[in-house]
Amino acid sequence: MIGDREAHVAGGAGGPLALLRTGAAAAARDDREAAESAYRAAAAAGHPDHTANAWFNLGTLYQRHGDATMAVTAYRVAIGLRHPQFSPKAAVNLGYVLFTELGDIAGARTAFAAAIASGHPVQARLAADNLAAMEQIAAADHLEPLDDGVNVADGRGPGRLKFRIWRRPEE
């Protein structure tokens, strides 16, 4: 049984779990400043599980608000914490941001490879699918996508795969 102090640190009022929930609520209402503050406070608490979660959430917050550089930094911190759940998720998202936002194919390959190597039952497969999609897209750079809004990092689509329809540019 954990004591009052441990309960407070893990999830009580002001603990990292409560801060994560506060950050999620702020992010849901699109209050970036409040979400960032709550996630950073949760990360600073140093809890073995919640710190990685906080850095992952910071990455998604920055990514959603178009700050690719900050997203990359946050995802790399989350990966470095070697958490069995959040590090592979961060690696998949990092690969996506590096490829789609920064055009860093080599960095994206490395990130997806890290997620694959994690052996995570969901993220490793998603990373492999994203890597294959990225290689297909990179190889088809001479073609013009008909639907440029495809999110290759989202494995929740029909058949869990995303694809693009390509055409040759009209000359």
Image (spheres, rainbow, N blue to C red):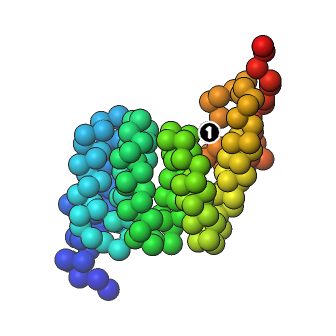
Q: Secondary structure at mark 1?
A: loop
Residue visible at 45% across and 65% down in the picture = 79
- Residue nearest the observer in this picture, 137 or 56: 137
Residue 13 appears in which quarter of the rendering? bottom left
Instruction: Say whether residue 62 is left or right of residue 31.
Output: right
- Picture mark count: 1
Residue visible at 71% across and 40% down in the picture = 137
Q: Position of residue 17 (x, y in %)?
A: 32, 62
Question: Is residue 83 at all visible to an observer of this figure?
Answer: yes
- Residue nearest the observer in this picture, 139 or 68: 139
Q: Position of residue 96 (x, y in %)?
A: 56, 47
Question: Is residue 89 at all visible to an observer of this figure?
Answer: no
- Residue nearest the observer in this picture, 96 or 85: 96
Q: Position of residue 55 (x, y in %)?
A: 36, 58
Q: Dot 1 corresponds to which residue?
A: 151
Quarter that holds the N terminus = bottom left
Residue visible at 43% across and 38% down in the picture = 64
Instruction: Say whether residue 101 is left or right of residue 112.
Output: left
Quarter that holds the C terminus = top right
Residue 12 appears in which quarter of the rendering? bottom left
Residue visible at 29% across and 83% down in the picture = 2
Q: Residues within 10 Å of mark 1 (few under 14, many from 20)?
A: some
Against 35, residue 125 (above or below) is below
Against 58, residue 42 (above or below) is below
Instruction: Say whether residue 20 is left or right of residue 123.
Output: left
Residue 4 appears in which quarter of the rendering? bottom left
Q: Position of residue 18 (x, y in %)?
A: 29, 58
